[in-house]
Image (spheres, rainbow, N blue to C red):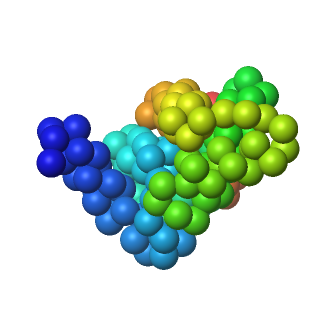
């Protein structure tokens, strides 16, 4: 196995272990793995449901900042249940009249995931965390 293959296998194992208790019955594909790994690297806890929900909302909302074609591929990859969905996604797009190869689908999904991962790593998604509102300051406090 090549060094790249070993690194990919290790990163997948780490991300899958991180998401083990949260809807991770299936294997993660590369795009899903990249975003879960960025979430864990940003110092967040996958066991905290409020943080996980905020992360999921962030990923869903930031996809709208992607170019239309890349967004379409990312959405299909994000919701894919299998580890290597690229050929199936390319076939789905082909049926819709969009002729693209599986390698191109993977590249576009990974570019989209990398763009979103930058936001996740910078913790820009934290504003989506639902927490109890802070109580108003007491009189004389600021």
Q: Determine the residue located farthest toward the right in the rendered image.
A: 96
Whether residue 16 is visible to the viewer of this picture, yes or no, is yes
Image: 69 above or below 19: above
Task: Indicate the quadrant containing the C terminus: top left, top right, bottom left or bottom right.
Answer: top right
For image coordinates 28% across by 46% down, the residue present is 8
Q: Position of residue 22 (x, y in %)?
A: 50, 71
Q: Position of residue 11 (x, y in %)?
A: 28, 49
Whether residue 128 is visible to the viewer of this picture, yes or no, is no
For image coordinates 69% across by 49% down, the residue present is 91
**In this view of the protein, which residue sits in the foreground, 132 or 130?**
130
Q: Quadrant of residue 72?
A: top right
Q: Quadrant of residue 108?
A: top right
Q: Position of residue 24 (x, y in %)?
A: 48, 70
**In this view of the protein, which residue sits in the foreground, 32 or 73?**
73
Q: Position of residue 49 (x, y in %)?
A: 55, 66
For image coordinates 40% across by 71% down, the residue present is 20
**In this view of the protein, which residue sits in the foreground, 14 or 106?**
106
Q: Determine the residue located farthest toward the top in the rendered image.
A: 67
């Amino acid at each position: 196995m090549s060094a790249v293959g070993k690194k990919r296998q290790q990163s997948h194992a780490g991300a899958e272990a991180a998401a083990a208790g949260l809807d991770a019955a299936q294997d993660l594909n590369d795009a899903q793995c990249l975003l879960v790994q960025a979430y864990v690297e940003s110092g967040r806890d996958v066991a905290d449901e409020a943080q996980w929900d905020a992360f999921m909302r962030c990923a869903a909302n930031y996809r709208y900042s992607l170019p239309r074609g890349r967004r379409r591929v990312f959405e299909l990859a994000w919701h894919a249940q299998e580890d290597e969905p690229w050929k199936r996604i390319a076939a789905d797009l082909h049926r819709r009249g969009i002729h693209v190869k599986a390698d191109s689908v993977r590249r576009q999904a990974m570019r989209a995931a990398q763009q979103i991962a930058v936001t996740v790593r910078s913790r820009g998604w934290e504003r989506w965390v639902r927490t109890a509102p802070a109580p108003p300051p007491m009189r004389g406090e600021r």
